[in-house]
Amino acid sequence: MSTKKSAVCYLTRIPDSETIEFAEQLARDSRLTSNVDIYIMIDDNNYQIPKNSSIHFIQINNQECIANGYHSSNKIEMNKDCISWDKAIYYFCQVKKLDYSFVWLIEDDTFIPSVDAFVFLHEKYSKDGCGDLICQKNDENLHGNTSGWKWADVVGKFQPPWYHSMVCAIGCSRKLLDGIATYAQQRHFLPFIEYMFNTIAMQNHLKVVNPPELNTIVFRENWTWEHVQQRPNNWFHPFKNEHIRRENRLKIANAWQPPSQNMDYTANVGYQNNMQYQGGQMPQYPYFMPPSQGAMSSSGNVITSLVYPPNIPPPYPKH
């Protein structure tokens, strides 16, 4: 089967009606119907899946994921072995590994203001070579310092350097998904998602892109209509109230003209080839979370660090 198609997967326990409505809009959009499949991962296996939908609803038994090594990716936060994150990673890394070249994983409290806002980011970064991990930031921990954040949890799971980001909405290439599959096969579990994606990407010489449209993906913020109106191409997290999400989408539909396809936004791009960063300075919006001390600037400077031979997975610590 061709691997040129992409997928979008909303991660839910039980999907609310607004998430389903927007997923249906994505599935029906003529720009996406031929090459992008829309999924909703449902953690609650007792949920009754709606009939006659253009969305692919997925429910996976917890034990199936655990038996295949896809578990514990958010246990540090949720204290559960298997949630929709583990199931979605399992599904796209293993079950559908031949079907998709690029996958968006999006938590259901992430707000994408319009189909146009999704299409703009998707068309810019989902093509081969444009990026292997599209995420909010790429903070670096060069020497394995375990003070601060949750860095102590990385010990025994990866050798330094380590990297992390908020991952409430991310894009993943097949190369990155294959790297995660290799880790699950070798270690029989998944590390915490907020450092797993970035660290595997960087240690496997993949390209990490931090678009300004994702710098409104943060842990906690009271987003308002004014914020959305100012940056209608941005994706926002958290946006938990489905009624406010629906109301804002209607306002956008009535007020916003999509940007020209010729418009361009500066993005930070990082990849490990002795870890280079390229691109202009990311706009310092009020809600941008600045990188931790030691992160590379956009000037193209090089930090000497672990470099693994091409096509050889990093030496993961023994289980």
Image (spheres, helix red, strand yellow):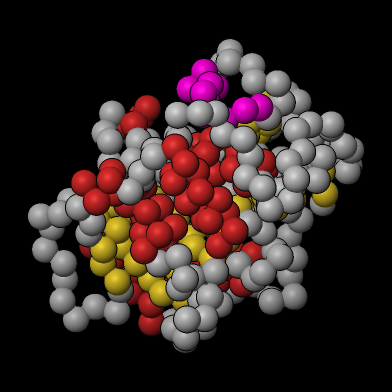
Residue at image point 67% right, 43% down: 202
In the rendered image, the vertical position of residue 131 relative to residue 199, given as above or below: below
Residue at image point 59% right, 58% down: 175
The kind of secondary structure the magenta stretch mainly shows is loop
In the rendered image, the vertical position of residue 132 relative to residue 307, given as above or below: below
Residue at image point 48% right, 60% down: 104
Position of 178 with respect to 304 (left or right) is left
List x then y, in percent, for residue 277. Answer: 80, 44
Residue at image point 75% right, 65% down: 264
Camera-nearest residue between 8 and 66:
66
Position of 90 with respect to 152 (left or right) is left
Q: Is residue 155 magenta?
A: yes
Residue 318 showing in the rendered view: yes
List x then y, in percent, for residue 81. Answer: 28, 36
Q: Is residue 231 magenta?
A: no
List x then y, in percent, for residue 213. Answer: 61, 54
List x then y, in percent, for residue 300. Answer: 88, 43
Camera-nearest residue between 134 and 283:
134
- Residue found at the very far top of the displayed protein: 147
Quarter of the figure with the C terminus: top left
The magenta stretch is 151-160
Camera-nearest residue between 133 and 17:
133
In the rendered image, the vertical position of residue 85 relative to residue 129, given as above or below: above
Camera-nearest residue between 77 and 316:
316
Position of 77 with respect to 7 (left or right) is left
Residue 253 showing in the rendered view: no
In the rendered image, the vertical position of residue 127 relative to residue 220, given as above or below: below
Count of picture labels? 0
